[in-house]
Amino acid sequence: MPEMSCPRCPGLPLQSSDVAGRRAYACGRCDGHAVTVAAVRQSTDPATFAALWASVLQRAMGGSAPCPVCARTMQAIMVPVDSLFGSVEVDLCSPCQLFWFDARERAQVAQAAPPSSLDEVALSAEVRALLGQEQARLDADLHRMRARNERLAEVAEGGAPSTDRLGAAATALTVLAEWWAALSS
């Protein structure tokens, strides 16, 4: 990773450090930390990361801090933490896939209790509806694929609806074409 500078202490280089077994980059003056999105995903439970990413999708605002890597202005996102702390503002550079946690933000996130399931994550009605539609689409695709696989198995076992060889071959080709089209879409 290229040399990074602290977004809060201009010109001060960040030092490689270890946070929860993951590489982070810390400022020796303000104790802020730059952490990659991948490291956050790997070091948090799925429900906590889902809440964080839902915040990115729903609550991105203009920020003021420059990214430690590319110096573009990062997005400020409000991450719902818990009833004690409410929300915490965290900075994100989407192109670099990098979060910036100020020392206070890092402490608040560390003390927060993660939700025990995705159902407890604060998602807007619109996002929940989109997730439901996507789940329904995936369920329908799975159902169609299972039906096609069953028809392919019948054809392979010689149990095609048509008993003549040309009809069986045509049926097999039709099923394979449907299967291929489903995979390609």
Image (cartoon, rainbow, N blue to C red):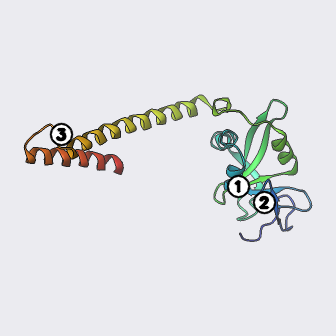
Observer-nearest of 163 and 56:
163
Label 2 vs label 3, nearer the camera: 3
Dot 1: element:
helix
Looking at the image, is 70 positioned above or below residue 142?
below
Taking 38 as reference, is 17 left or right?
right
N-term-proximal mark, 2 vs 1: 2
Give the amino acid at mark 2. Ala
* Name of the residue lying farthest toward the right: 29
**Residue at the location (13% across, 45% down)?**
168
- The kind of residue on which mark 1 rests is Ala
Gap between marks 2 and 1, in whole Å? 8 Å
Q: At 70% across and 60% down in the image, what residue appears?
A: 72
> Could you tell me which quadrant the N terminus lies in?
bottom right
> Is residue 89 at least partly visible in the picture?
yes
For the residues bearing labels 3 and 1, Cβ distance under 8 angstroms: no
Q: How many marks?
A: 3
* Occupied quadrant, residue 96: bottom right
Task: Provide the secondary structure element on which disc 2 rests.
Answer: strand
Of badges 3 and 1, the one in the foreground is 3
User: Relative to residue 41, is residue 103 drawn left or right?
Assistant: right
| Residue 35 percent across, percent down from the top left | 75, 56
Q: Which mark is residue 159?
A: 3
Residue to which mark 2 is pinned: 24
Q: Earlier in the sequence, mark 3 or mark 1?
A: 1
Check disc 1 and report the residue beneath it. Answer: 39
Q: Are marks 2 and 1 in contact (CB under 8 Å)?
A: yes
Distance between the Cα atoms at labels 3 and 1? 52 Å
